[in-house]
Amino acid sequence: MAHVLVLDGGIGTRSEIKDGIYTGRPDGPFTYRSGKAEAIRMVAEEHGIDLSASYAYSDSESDLPMLSAVGHPVAVNPDAELERIAREEGWRIMRFDRLGRRLRIAGALGAITLVGGGGGYVAGRIRRRPSRLAVLLRR
């Protein structure tokens, strides 16, 4: 994912590899809740990253340990519990509700256009093709 998004790296649950073969066992912490914060601390220590100067973004209270590990936590379209805690802690809250509403409207209009256009195409095909009864009556 980090490669696709042209990021310097990414943190996620890693799988153990022995002799070039995946063993099916984890290699490092499970990156959920406190495990995600643990993995971030490990990478920060390994690469000399100052977490107090770092940012973290999340929409879920499950990321509270990660958000608490950095100096600049940001709640993005947060769930109710994360929003409550972000307000208590004075963390930045970002909302993209307008974008979501615009995307839903655009999707609905696109669906209507497709259905309307498809319906027009079907109606045109039906009108152009005479019914079997009409063919029989012409004979």
Image (cartoon, grey):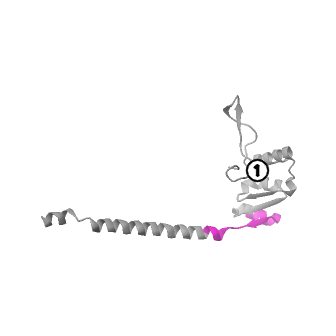
Q: Observer-nearest residue: 64 or 94? A: 94
Q: Quadrant of residue 20?
A: top right
Secondary structure of the magenta portion, mostly?
helix
Q: How far from the left and from the top, in percent, is residue 63?
A: 74, 54
Q: Observer-nearest residue: 47 or 26? A: 47
Residue range corresponding to the magenta coloring: 83-100
> Where does label 1 land, which residue?
8
Tell me the element at label 1.
Answer: loop
Please give the name of the residue rendered at 20% of the width and 62% of the height, measured from the top-left corner: 132
Q: How far from the left and from the top, in percent, is residue 100?
A: 62, 67
Q: Is residue 90 left or right of residue 108?
A: right
Q: Residues within 10 Å of mark 1 (few under 14, many from 20)?
A: few
Q: Is residue 134 left or right of residue 122?
A: left
From the viewer's perspective, is residue 117 above or below residue 63? below
Q: Quadrant of residue 134?
A: bottom left
Residue type pointed to by label 1: Asp
Residue 93 falls inside the magenta stretch: yes
Q: How far from the left and from the top, in percent, is residue 34?
A: 77, 48
Please give the name of the residue rendered at 31% of the width and 65% of the height, measured from the top-left corner: 125
Most extreme residue toward the top, as rendered?
19
Please give the name of the residue rendered at 70% of the width and 28% of the height, measured from the top-left corner: 19
